[in-house]
C-alpha cells in the first residue's frame, strides 16, 4: 500500500513539473545571433549577467525545437569562441536534450559537436562522458528487442560517437576509459545494465578495435554480479517476511538479461568474437573462484565453434598440469582450471566422446607420473604441496562418475577405464580421495564398485576415521558447471548441457530444460521448503550434490 502511494505522489509531482516546463518553453524565445552577442559581451566586456542567465536557462529549462535550432546554429557559427574560458557554457550545452529530436535537428547538433571537438580537443572528455551517460537513461526492460523509440535515440548517439572517432581517432581510447568509468552499478536495476551492455556491443560493431576491451569490461562487471547473486539470495532469506522489496536490487534478474545480451552477441558475430571470448575467459573468468553463471558463456562458445573448443581444452590442461610455468602461487588457478576442464567435458552436450577419452588418458598418465616422482617425498600428507595432483585426480573421479553411462557401455570402454589404472590413484600414499568432495567420492565409488574396477570403501572408511582424529585441508565443493538456473538465458543454455544420469535409477531422465521449466510452472511447490534434515537425508540417499544434481533437486 505504501509503495503504491509513493508511486502516485511521484506521478503527480512529475505531471506538475511537466506542466511548469511546458509553460517555460512557451515563454522562452531565442532570437537569431542572440547567443553570439551574449558570448561576445562576456568575453570582451566581462558582462557576466546575461551569460550566467543563459547557462541557467540551458541547465534548467527544456527547449522547444525552434529555440534548439537557433541555439546550435548560433553556436556553430561562433564555435571558435568556445575556448577554455567558456567551459561552463559548453558543459551547459551538453545538458540540452537532443537525441530524441527530428533528424534535421540531430544533424545540426552533430555538425556543432564535430566542429567543437575539431577546434577545441580539450572538450572531448566531457563531451564523450555526456554521450555515454545517455545510455544509462531510465526505461522499461524489453523481451525480444528494444522499442523503436529507444533504438532511434540510441542510433543518434552512436552516429555522433562514430563521427567523433572518425574525425579524432585518438578519442577511441578516451571512449573506452569513459565506458568503464560510466558502467552502471549492478544494483541500479536490470534495464540500466542491460541497455548499457546492449549499447557497448553496438559500439563494438563500428569500432572493431575495441571489441576485446569492451568484452573485458562487460565480463568484469558480470563477474561482480555473479559473485553477489548468492549474497542477494541469503539477504532475501533473512528478510523473507518483509513485504516491500525493491525490484531494482534483483541481481539475478539483471545478470540473466545481461547473459542473454552476451549470448546473442556471440551468436550474431561468431567468428569475430568467439576467439576473443576465449581470451577474456582465460584472463578474467578462469582465475575467479565460486561464480556459477558467467562461465556458461564459454560452454556456449565451445558448443558452436570447434576451433575454440580445441583451444580451450588445450589451454585448460596446460594450466591444470602446470605446463605454462606460472610457478609458485598458481595452485588456486590450477585447481580452478582442472574444475573447468572436468565440468566442460562432463556437461557440454557437443563435446565428442573421443575428446573425453583423450583427456582422461592424459590426466591419468600425468597422475601416475606424479605418483612415481613423489614416492620418496617426505610431505605426502601435505595437500597444499600436492594440491594440483589432488585436483586432477578429482577431475578424473568426477568424469568417471558423471560419464558412467558411456564409459561402461561396452567391453571396449570398460577395458579403457581399466587401462587408466584407477586403483593406483585411489590407494597411493597421496590419498586423493581424502580431499575429494564427498558426493563425488560416493558416486565414483558406487560406479567403479558395480563394474568391479576399483574398491574404494576401505579407503573411504579409513579417511573418515582420520578426519575425526585430525583436521585436513578440504577443497570447497564448487563445480563451475552446476545446472544453470537463470530462466531467460537458460532457454539457450539448457539444451547444450548434459545432466548427471544415475545408472542405478529406473525411469527416463529429464533434461535440465524440461525439469527447470516444470519447476517454474509449479508455483505451489515453492512454498514446500524441506527442512535441513530432509535435504541431508535426500542428498545421502540419492547422491545429490552441487556436481550431481538430479532434475528434482535443481531448484531447491
Image (cartoon, rainbow, N blue to C red):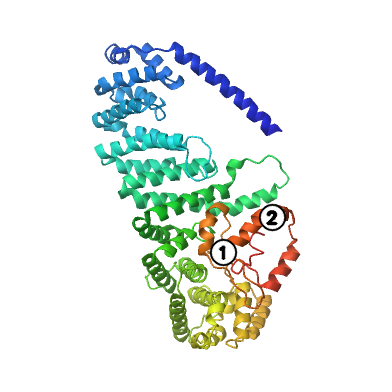
- Quarter of the image for residue 278 reads bottom left
**Residue 65's x, y, as percent?**
39, 20
Q: Nearer the viewer, residue 258 or 223?
A: 258
Residue 65 to residue 139: above or below: above
Dot 2 corresponds to which residue? 522
Residue 161 to residue 414: above or below: above
Work out whether residue 234 can be spotted. yes
Q: Quadrant of the N terminus?
A: top right
Q: Mark 1, residues whose alpha carbon is within 10 Å: few (<14), some, or many (≥20)? A: many
Q: Mark 2, residues whose alpha carbon is within 10 Å: few (<14), some, or many (≥20)? A: few
Q: Residue at x 49, y 53 (%)?
A: 223
Residue 296 to residue 444: above or below: above
Work out whether residue 400 can be spotted. no
Calculate the distance from the C-alpha at mark 1 to the C-alpha at mark 2: 22 Å
**Residue 432's x, y, as percent?**
55, 78
Question: Which label number is shown at residue 482?
Answer: 1
Amino acid at each position: 500500500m505504501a509503495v503504491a502511494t509513493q508511486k502516485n505522489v511521484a506521478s503527480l509531482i512529475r505531471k506538475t513539473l511537466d506542466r511548469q516546463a511546458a509553460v517555460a518553453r512557451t515563454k522562452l524565445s531565442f532570437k537569431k545571433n542572440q547567443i553570439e552577442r551574449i558570448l561576445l559581451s562576456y568575453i570582451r566586456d566581462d558582462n557576466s549577467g546575461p551569460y550566467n542567465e543563459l547557462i541557467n536557462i540551458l541547465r534548467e529549462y527544456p527547449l522547444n525545437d525552434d529555440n534548439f535550432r537557433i541555439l546550435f546554429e548560433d553556436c556553430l557559427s561562433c564555435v571558435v569562441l568556445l575556448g577554455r574560458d567558456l567551459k561552463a557554457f559548453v558543459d551547459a550545452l551538453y545538458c540540452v536534450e537532443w537525441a530524441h529530436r527530428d533528424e534535421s535537428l540531430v544533424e545540426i547538433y552533430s555538425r556543432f559537436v564535430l566542429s567543437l571537438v575539431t577546434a577545441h580537443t580539450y572538450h572531448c572528455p566531457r563531451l564523450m562522458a555526456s554521450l555515454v551517460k545517455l545510455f544509462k537513461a531510465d526505461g522499461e526492460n524489453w523481451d525480444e528487442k528494444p522499442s523503436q523509440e529507444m533504438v532511434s535515440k540510441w542510433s543518434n548517439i552512436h552516429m555522433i560517437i562514430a563521427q567523433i572517432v572518425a574525425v579524432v581517432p585518438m578519442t577511441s581510447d578516451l571512449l573506452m576509459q569513459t565506458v568503464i568509468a560510466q558502467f552502471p552499478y549492478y544494483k541500479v536495476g536490470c534495464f540500466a545494465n542491460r541497455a548499457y551492455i546492449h549499447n557497448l556491443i553496438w559500439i563494438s560493431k563500428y569500432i572493431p578495435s575495441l571489441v576485446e576491451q569492451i568484452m573485458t569490461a562487460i565480463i568484469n562487471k558480470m563477474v561482480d554480479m555473479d559473485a553477489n547473486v548468492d549474497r542477494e539470495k541469503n539477504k532475501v532469506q533473512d528478510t523473507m517476511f518483509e513485504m516491500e522489496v525493491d525490484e531494482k536490487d534483483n541481481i539475478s534478474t539483471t545478470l540473466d538479461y545481461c547473459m542473454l545480451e552476451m549470448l546473442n552477441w556471440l551468436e550474431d558475430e561468431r567468428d569475430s568474437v568467439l576467439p576473443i571470448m576465449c581470451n577474456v575467459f582465460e584472463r578474467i573468468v578462469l582465475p575467479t573462484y565460486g561464480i556459477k553463471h558467467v562461465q556458461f558463456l564459454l560452454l556456449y562458445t565451445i558448443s558452436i565453434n570447434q576451433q575454440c573448443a580445441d583451444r580451450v581444452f588445450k589451454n585448460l590442461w596446460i594450466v591444470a598440469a602446470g605446463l605454462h610455468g606460472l610457478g609458485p602461487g598458481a595452485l588456486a588457478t590450477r585447481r580452478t582450471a582442472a574444475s573447468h576442464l572436468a565440468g566442460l567435458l562432463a556437461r557440454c552436450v557437443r563435446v565428442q566422446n573421443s575428446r573425453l577419452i583423450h583427456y582422461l588418458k592424459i590426466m591419468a598418465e600425468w597422475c601416475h607420473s606424479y605418483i612415481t616422482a613423489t614416492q620418496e617425498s617426505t610431505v605426502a600428507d601435505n595437500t597444499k604441496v600436492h594440491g594440483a595432483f589432488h585436483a586432477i585426480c578429482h577431475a578424473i573421479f568426477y568424469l568417471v562418475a558423471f560419464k558412467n553411462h558411456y564409459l561402461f557401455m561396452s567391453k571396449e570402454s570398460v577395458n579403457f577405464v581399466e587401462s587408466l589404472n584407477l586403483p593406483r590413484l585411489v590407494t597411493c600414499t597421496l590419498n586423493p580421495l581424502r580431499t575429494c568432495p564427498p558426493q563425488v567420492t560416493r558416486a565414483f565409488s558406487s560406479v567403479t564398485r558395480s563394474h568391479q574396477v576399483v574398491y574404494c570403501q576401505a579407503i573411504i572408511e579409513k579417511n573418515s576415521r582420520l578426519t575425526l582424529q585430525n583436521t585436513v585441508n578440504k577443497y570447497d565443493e564448487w563445480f563451475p558447471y552446476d545446472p544453470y538456473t537463470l530462466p531467460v538465458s537458460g532457454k539457450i543454455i539448457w539444451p547444450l548441457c548434459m545432466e548427471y544420469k544415475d545408472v542405478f535409477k529406473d525411469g527416463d531422465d529429464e533434461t535440465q530444460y524440461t525439469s527447470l521449466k516444470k519447476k517454474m510452472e509449479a508455483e505451489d511447490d515453492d512454498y514446500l521448503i524441506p527442512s535441513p534434515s530432509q535435504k541431508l537425508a535426500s542428498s545421502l540417499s540419492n547422491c545429490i550434490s552441487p556436481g550431481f544434481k538430479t532434475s528434482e533437486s535443481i531448484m531447491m
